[in-house]
Image (spheres, rainbow, N blue to C red):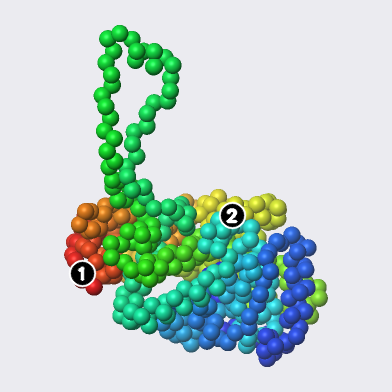
Amino acid sequence: MSGRCEHDGEGERGPGGGDGARDGRLAEYALRLEALALEFGLDFDPVQVDMVPNSFMLEIAVYGLPVRMRHWSFGVRYIHQLVRQHMGHSRIFEVMFPGDPCRAFMLEHNSLAENTLVTAHVLGHADFAKNNALFRRFMGMAGSHILEQSAARAQRLETALAEHGQERVEAVLDAALALEAHIDIDQPLHRPLYPEYAGQGGEPAADGFRDRYARLPGETDPPATDTRRQRAPLPPHPEHDLLWFVAHYGPELDAWERDIFLAVREEAYYFHPIHACQIMNEGWASYWHARLLREAGFMPHELYLAAIKSHSDVVRPYAGGQQLALSLNPYHLGFVMWEYIVERDGLETARRIMCEEDDFGFIRNYLDQELADKLDLFVHETRKDGETRIASRDIHAIREAILAPKYNYGAPSVAVTALKLDGSLELRHDYQHDGRGLDLQQAERVMEYVERIWRRPVALNTVDFCGVVRTLPARKICF
């Protein structure tokens, strides 16, 4: 979700102590920060803020939404996040959901300084969500009232659980969430079904010369065309939107099962720009919370210093001093890149980039060798014996290493290639596009989920890690 502000370690509580959520000064600072943001040219939809306890914030972080269809996988994520927090490796400051209005959730036990910083951070997110082209496109399709829509879906799921039982409903959710990343972002959310019949060859346009030529003596009449309609193949082309295909062409799915697949698909459309713009979005929000706090002359000096301390915790690299970090902090990279762009090209250019790009264009066009060297970025590789070494400092390799996890939601590229007359399904992994083989063990588990709800044989063609062509065999699994 947009605006998940998290950093390693617990940090320190700022002055003003106690509970920033119940401090009347936070409301005053929020209004003045909003006015200051408007003076700087930020343009955002209204922001509604809710103060919540840590347990609820943790649920929002792992579910991705305040209310969502419940599933065992979210419980696994919850435990993982809880362990990280208890070990001091993670702390969530806030969660923000784009929309009109935007909805922000802050921790009620944060200090006044921390929640003041979060308020400014959320304004940066809100500006980004309203003006970035990718966000506008997908918010226009998935709707700007995702929280209400998600709550309604969760209620429909509870009805299905009561009517059909947990085992059956959970099997459908297993399959839908296993395919959550497999949407086609080049297709609209609401798209028509395939044409039922193959298109007939078009007749040539009316032409006076052709008509006179056809009437010349000795010319024979053209052969009659076959006017019988032929059914179009399914799919007429490789279909990468697996959720959409299963929902509409699953041979034995009930209406409530199709509804679950379409609900997961709609949520995946909502989350796509958040995933595809994470570095830009978090960097933009971090740039603006730092700048707004710096220009907020109405803040007491002690409060400002405490807020900037929290800022440093958020945007710092994962390693300090002479250490090398093997992972990238998107807050740090995005923040430094926006500062670099504003200093070099001006704020107007930075806003244009913010409106037009996603992380792919942002990294490829604006992360140059000079900045990569300044940030000490590199590509690393781990050998079979466990040794990790620097593989490259070339800017092209660095860019692609940063972007690799973002392709196709980080999932392999898989498409439906054939729906046969007996209802069996053929899938193909585009390993040449991915440049890698599948994790066959994980793929077989996903296939098992899909077969249980498809209720016909399903086969997947792929390659293994050694580049050997493999077919995960079709087998019928009775539900």
Q: Which residue is mark 2?
A: 133
Question: In 3D space, how far apart are the residues under numbered discs 2 and 1 (Cα atoms)?
Answer: 44 Å
Q: Give whichever of 204, 367 is nearer the camera.
A: 204
Question: Please, what is the three-letter code of the amino acid marked with disc 2?
Answer: Ala
Question: Please, what is the three-letter code of the amino acid marked with disc 1?
Answer: Ile
Name the N-terminal-most of marks 2 and 1.
2
Q: Give whichever of 51, 348 is nearer the camera.
A: 51
At x 55% / y 50%, what residue is drawn? 365
Q: Secondary structure at mark 2?
A: helix
At x 29% / y 68%, what residue is drawn? 453
Q: Which residue is mark 1?
A: 477
Residue 372: give x, y in percent of width and height.
Answer: 54, 57
Relative to 157, is 457 on the left or the right? left
At x 68% / y 91%, what residue is drawn? 18
In this rendering, the answer to whether 239 lies above or below 450 is: above
In this rendering, the answer to whether 233 lies above or below 163 is: above
Relative to 408, is 465 on the left or the right? left
Q: Give whichever of 337, 62 is nearer the camera.
A: 62
Disc marking residue 98: none
In this rendering, the answer to whether 160 lies above or below 356 is: below
The C terminus lies in which quarter of the figure?
bottom left
Q: Give whichever of 325, 313 is nearer the camera.
A: 313
Relative to 103, is 456 on the left or the right? left
Residue 287 visible at all: no
At x 30% / y 46%, what residue is drawn? 232
